[in-house]
Amino acid sequence: MTQYKIPVIPGDGIGPEIIAEGRKVIDAAGEKFGFDVDWVEFPHGADHYLETGELISEDSLKELSGYKGIYLGSIGDDRIAPGVLEKGILLAARFYFDQYINLRPIKLLDGVWCPIKDKTPADIDFTVVRENTEDFYIGIGGRAKSGTSKDLLEVHRTLYNAKFGLDIETDSEEIGYQVGMISKEGTQRVISYAFDLAEKSKKHVSSVDKANVLSDIYGFWREEFNAVAEKHPDVTTDFNYVDAMTMWFVKNPEWFDVVVTPNMFGDIITDLGAMVQGGLGLAPGGNINPEGTSMFEPIHGSAPKYKGQNKVNPIATIWAGAMLIEQMGEKEAADTIVSAIETNISEAKVQTYDMGGSAGTSDVGEDIARIVLGK
Amino acid sequence: MTQYKIPVIPGDGIGPEIIAEGRKVIDAAGEKFGFDVDWVEFPHGADHYLETGELISEDSLKELSGYKGIYLGSIGDDRIAPGVLEKGILLAARFYFDQYINLRPIKLLDGVWCPIKDKTPADIDFTVVRENTEDFYIGIGGRAKSGTSKDLLEVHRTLYNAKFGLDIETDSEEIGYQVGMISKEGTQRVISYAFDLAEKSKKHVSSVDKANVLSDIYGFWREEFNAVAEKHPDVTTDFNYVDAMTMWFVKNPEWFDVVVTPNMFGDIITDLGAMVQGGLGLAPGGNINPEGTSMFEPIHGSAPKYKGQNKVNPIATIWAGAMLIEQMGEKEAADTIVSAIETNISEAKVQTYDMGGSAGTSDVGEDIARIVLGK
Ligand SMILES: CC(C)[C@H](C(=O)O)[C@@H](O)C(=O)O
Ligand SMILES: CC(C)[C@H](C(=O)O)[C@@H](O)C(=O)O
């Protein structure tokens, strides 16, 4: 019997409830496919932060880096200012482990209610590969005030006014600024990953950017995209502005095979993608470093108001669990979990409120585990 | 008879065809409401650029600044690199005239096919106020290479690595970067405009940002939002992350009254809004400087492949024309045009292909002009 050790961070709000169901289903898959998981719990999240002042320590990160895949519930708590936990735990892990791929399958499962008219599961079945360590997520920015030395206000004044022949600022003006950067290496590796995926799929890669306005950063993105595309002459490609992309996700999701996107635009369009595939309760995500430590999570938040109510849909988390064990090498077990999710949905007997049912979180987890075991 | 002089830039692709219909309808409204428009044509666009090398000159901008409202068709041409015309004409005008409001009504008209299930015109009826002169649209960015002096690569290396305990760079690494900035003045004026609008509407303002990750720039935005909100104690508010906002636009558009957003996120969510209201053929936009020169346009592009075919839907342009004459003070004429559009749609007799009909661009313009005239 293969033995795996998998670290798990249940996190905040509904995190512990949904993770419990995810574990249940993976354990069932292990029973069926001959592996056993030793779950190693990590306490990180809001309570741990409020008690100890620690978000996630260097030591914890080092310890976690000994594993291939982390199972994450959800992070976020109303008692703490926006960004503190997300940046201090979730983004810290993505950056520390250099999880440069954020993989988001956008797939309308059979039997799921789609909010878009006239679309069937055959129309909504593609993958978004989001860059996950660069772009506007690098946390470089600040404030500047007239009078501050060496501040960016000077840059602002000079360039902005010279560019547009204006003279709009006053002495009291204050600004907030943010810098985004993408590197050659960072851009090529994620685009290469997308092309490799497309080679095994429908051989089409769609790029997302806003090169007509943010021309410096995304003009660079397009060049790197073209450089990688040249090595894949059998894969067709197209460029899409992010604004237009939100329209195609609604109107023509059937156009897509693999979509590759810079970090921030990826954040935006994958939430829309989650909606198109039936809602956040069904949308998993993987933060992947193919050679290192990856991390899998539902893409929804910690939904504090549902905490402890055994009410929310665990399917996104269970699906993320399937991605996790696929990453460990258990492809057949992973496929079995995804098809068990599909069976649960098409039977439409044990479903949470968001899918029109009245079952609890744990009922759905048990039902999917039962289906995995073929009972 | 009141006499107006209105500059018009038909622009590229289908621009001249749709603008012709917009003028036709405004002229009809003038006939009915007692005003006469002297249209002053400006040649700017792709052909003019290819012939003369000029995008839009300081002299033209100065001349245009003598007017209250400009009527714009569409800008964009496949012969010219992405961004050149958009930045050199459209964005140049927005910045030069300090059109700090981009106003986008998101309204599902009666009889329009909505791609979202179970939504009626009562559910989709709100306004997006997009900041239009700052944020990531200021055009500050560049490339940096290892070895370049005083480059941003140093900043990148130091901050990025220090922040995440990494050491990822190689000597050959190259980066592309972009800077976004918002000012106190620029942020407060657009948010104030949104609150003023909400005061006359359902008294609710929703803010869009990504303060949990781009905390410097959008933390600043939130502070300014709160400062303005304090002056409007009777208006309720909420904050939304842009990623979540794309979900609410699809799932709960009925939640919104006035949505205020930084420039780039506004670009993205208003295209999605256009789709939700039935498609780009129906979505108008106004670039507004309440004290200066405003500019009205359909939000769709120049659709080169339909050029000269009398095929595309002129309704977005006609609706933008209504916004233009409302800005000139002709509120009743503007309302009459919008309701004529609604009549044309609900009669469903004279419609372009995108609405399931087979009429030409000019047929639709004539039909709406006829309805305006009460014939
Ligand atoms: C919670 C937040 C920091 C995160 C992000 O912006 O990446 C989330 O929206 C996601 O998509 O995983
Ligand atoms: C054409 C482009 C520069 C423009 C923008 O990004 O603002 C357009 O998308 C818009 O929304 O008006």
Image (cartoon, coloured by chain):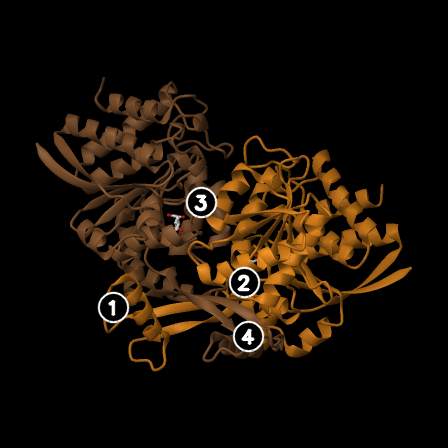
Chain colours: A orange, B brown
Residue A84 seen in render = no
Q: Secondary structure at mark 1?
A: loop
Same subunit, tags 4 and 3: yes
Residue A151 x/y as whole percent: 36, 77
What's the mark number on residue B212? none
Identified at 41% across, 63% down, the residue is B218
B351 to the left or right of B288: right
Check whether the beta carbons of the residues at disc 2 and disc 1 lie within 8 A of each other. Answer: no
Earlier in the chain: of badge 2 and badge 1, it is: 2
Instruction: Report how far apart the C-alphas of labels 2 and 4 lie in the structure.
Output: 26 Å
Q: Secondary structure at mark 3?
A: loop
Instruction: Report how far apart the C-alphas of labels 3 and 1 lie in the structure.
Output: 37 Å
A87 to the left or right of B303: right
Which residue position is annotated with label 3?
B78
Same subunit, tags 2 and 4: no
Q: What amino acid type is highlighted by mark number 1?
A: Glu
Which residue position is annotated with label 2?
A77
Which residue position is annotated with label 4?
B160
Q: What amino acid type is highlighted by mark number 3?
A: Asp
Would you say the beta carbon of the disc 2 residue lies within 8 angstroms of ligand 1?
no
Q: Secondary structure at mark 2?
A: loop
What's the mark number on residue A169? 1
